[in-house]
Image (spheres, helix red, strand yellow):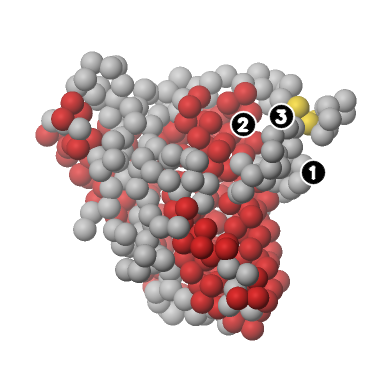
């Protein structure tokens, strides 16, 4: 495994530093591999927040909003895998050097000021989610623009325009998910420059909105906002609504949003709970942790297999198995949150998302 591909590298920073004329097919393959790792990195922290909500029915609005974002991120990862295979590459997902490391930074050196960790849903974790999804110039906020994941996707988009002849339609995975998860969430074949450009547009606008609007135009629920603003309004405790008198036409002045009652899952130490003597789990908790980590690893293996075959039936089977394992993660994760840490803090265990060799 080369340093350029490793999760803990400065690969994205290096890629963004290359002049546009030098962004050839090799650049595009490396950038897309990093984008796959970037999409995967957002899932564990968001899932921990979702699973920690005690009563998904009572707090349905917040639960559904976070769940919709997670489903978007999953489809984004699938679309980027299609982008990589359409130009002859092979997504790498099932490898210890490539999986996310928590607590830690996002892959490739992007947004280095953010430390991403695994914990329950709190105001601090919501602020972290917002930092991950933050656009360069958010609507209804007045801060200096900064680098964003959207800027990285913009560079990928431009590189595809310069290398449109590389798009061949190899090993494309197709799955219709629009009825269940909303517009833009289906995995579609990316066999033309337009199809690739449309897919990148979906990823960017679902995550960040546009420069003039926080709306998600590829929504699953009426009135759905882009990811950054969905998280931000939960943190603010009020809906983001159109306000004609506001400087940018939007303000957090809508209906109140109650913070959900959540299990107080502690922050998972680097390498898992057993790495800290004060958190060392008993055999019952360790069994749940082991079960979760094995299922998580099977998800990664299934996803890699999905884009390794030219047989659409085999690809669909591998994707289906990975999706099933993904759903199975919820049971041990929620069970772990019923066990208090032995340090007397009142916080609980939670999933570690550790790769099993």
Kindly give the residue lying farthest to the left in the view shown.
283
Among the two numbered marks 3 and 1 on one chain, the one whose residue lies closer to the N terminus:
1
**Disc 3 + disc 2, Cβ < 8 Å:** yes
Q: Position of residue 206 (x, y in %)?
A: 64, 49
Tell me the residue at 61%/65% (across/down).
Answer: 156
Q: 183 left or right of 41?
A: right
Are there few (<14), some (14-19), or many (20+) residues within 10 Å of tag 3? many
Note whether 56 is above or below 316 in the view shown. Answer: above
Q: Position of residue 150 (x, y in %)?
A: 63, 53
The C terminus, quarter of image: bottom left
Among the two numbered marks 1 and 2 on one chain, the one whose residue lies closer to the N terminus:
1
Q: In the structure shown, which secondary structural element does the residue marked by tag 2 occupy? A: helix
Q: In the structure shown, which secondary structural element does the residue marked by tag 3 occupy? A: loop
Q: Residue 232 bears which disc, if any?
A: 2
Mark 3, residue position: 240
Q: 311 left or right of 22?
A: left
Mark 1, residue position: 212
Note whether 304 is above or below 180 in the view shown. Answer: below
Q: Quadrant of residue 287?
A: top left
């Amino acid at each position: 495994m080369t340093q350029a591909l490793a999760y803990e590298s400065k690969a994205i920073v290096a890629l963004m530093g290359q002049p546009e004329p030098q962004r050839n097919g090799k650049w595009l393959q490396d950038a897309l591999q990093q984008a796959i790792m970037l999409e995967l990195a957002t899932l564990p922290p968001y899932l921990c927040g979702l699973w920690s909500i005690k009563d998904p029915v009572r707090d349905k609005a917040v639960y559904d909003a976070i769940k919709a974002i997670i489903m978007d991120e999953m489809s984004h990862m699938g679309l980027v895998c299609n982008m990589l295979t359409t130009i002859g590459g092979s997504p790498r997902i099932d490898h210890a050097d490539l999986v996310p490391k928590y607590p830690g930074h996002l892959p490739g050196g992007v947004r280095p000021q953010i430390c991403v960790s695994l914990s329950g849903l709190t105001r601090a974790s919501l602020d972290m989610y917002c930092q991950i999804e933050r656009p360069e110039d958010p609507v209804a906020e007045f801060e200096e623009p900064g680098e964003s994941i959207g800027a990285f996707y913009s560079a990928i988009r431009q590189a595809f325009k310069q290398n449109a002849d590389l798009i061949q339609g190899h090993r494309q995975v197709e799955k219709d998910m629009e009825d269940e998860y909303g517009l833009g969430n289906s995995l579609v074949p990316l066999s033309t420059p337009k199809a690739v450009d449309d897919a990148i547009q979906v990823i960017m606008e679902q995550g960040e909105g546009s420069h003039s609007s926080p709306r998600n135009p590829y929504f699953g629920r009426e009135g759905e906002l882009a990811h950054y603003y969905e998280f931000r309004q939960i943190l603010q405790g009020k809906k983001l609504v159109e306000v004609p008198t506001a400087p940018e036409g939007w303000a957090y002045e809508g209906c109140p949003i109650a913070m959900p009652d959540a299990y107080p899952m502690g922050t998972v130490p680097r390498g898992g709970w057993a790495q800290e003597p004060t958190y060392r789990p008993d055999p019952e908790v360790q069994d749940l942790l082991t079960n979760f980590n094995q299922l998580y690893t099977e998800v990664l293996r299934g996803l890699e297999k999905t884009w390794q075959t030219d047989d659409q039936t085999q690809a669909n089977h591998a994707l289906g198995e990975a999706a099933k394992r993904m759903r199975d993660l919820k049971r041990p994760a929620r069970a772990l949150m019923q066990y208090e840490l032995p340090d007397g803090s009142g916080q609980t265990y939670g999933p570690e998302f550790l790769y099993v060799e």
